Amino acid sequence: MAKFVLVIANKAYSSWSMRGWLALKATGAPFDEVVIPLDRPETRERILRYSPAAKVPVLVDGDVSIWESLAIGEYLAERFPAAHLWPEDAKARALARAVSAEMHAGFMSLRRAMPMNCRVSYPPRPIKDPELAADIARIEALWADCRARFGAGGPYLFGRYSLADAMFAPVVTRFTTYQVPVGAGTAAYMKAIHAHPHVAEWLAEARAETERIEKYEAPPP
């Protein structure tokens, strides 16, 4: 089988790239990595060579290109059933898909107020924006519900590490970067995600990047 090609952006800043990369790493399949830095004059043109959507990540499998991190995860789950990227239990699998889709489409206040930069750590600050507070509360409640219902077999949302954890890993880095105050259950889950070898590898490579983009480096107001 020919190697996959995964097109991503800066590891420090690109949450979507992190999701696609974690999904592919979970399969154990070899792949070549193409990194296209954000916010350069040539960024859009370079991504368009791989995807008409002009967004990363993009998974290239021979003559097929798949964009959008959730679609990449679904494709890989079908290609590598032995990797168990989704939970085996039907109800757990349905919930895992639901929460992953919610992450894919939602939490806009969190995205705006806390852009991803997994190289830094800012002093904690009060959460004054009610919409941001609501996003954080919803995420904590969602994680707690998944863990309570299906997480008894391990430290992740559905016990065993799954695509749902890959989808939420960038949120864990955001909570860490901005030192969001969280409950004990959330803190334990965040610790488990940070300890996962694939997440640790991504974060180490993000810290090693030399490029800095000002809008992602500016501290919160």
Image: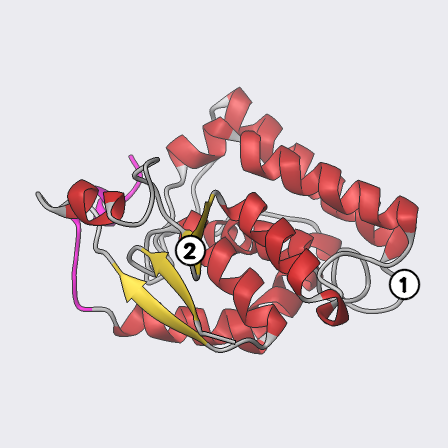
| Image x and y of residue 121, in percent | 37, 58
Query: For residue 112, what is the image quadrant?
Result: top left
Q: Earlier in the sequence, mark 2 or mark 1?
A: 2
View extreme (top): residue: 130
Residue that label 1 marks: 152
- Secondary structure, mark 2, is loop
Separation of marks 2 and 1 at Cα, in angstroms: 41 Å
Q: Which mark is residue 63?
A: 2
- Secondary structure, mark 1, is loop
| Image x and y of residue 138, in percent | 67, 33
| Image x and y of residue 133, in percent | 56, 29
Residue 72 lies in magenta, yes or no?
A: no
Q: In this rendered view, identify the residue nearer to me: 65 or 8.
A: 65
In the depicted structure, whether residue 72 falls above or below residue 152: above
Q: In this rendered view, identify the residue nearer to me: 168 or 110.
A: 168
Residue occupying image coordinates x 61% and y 71%: 27
**In this picture, which residue range is highlighted in magenta?**
210-221
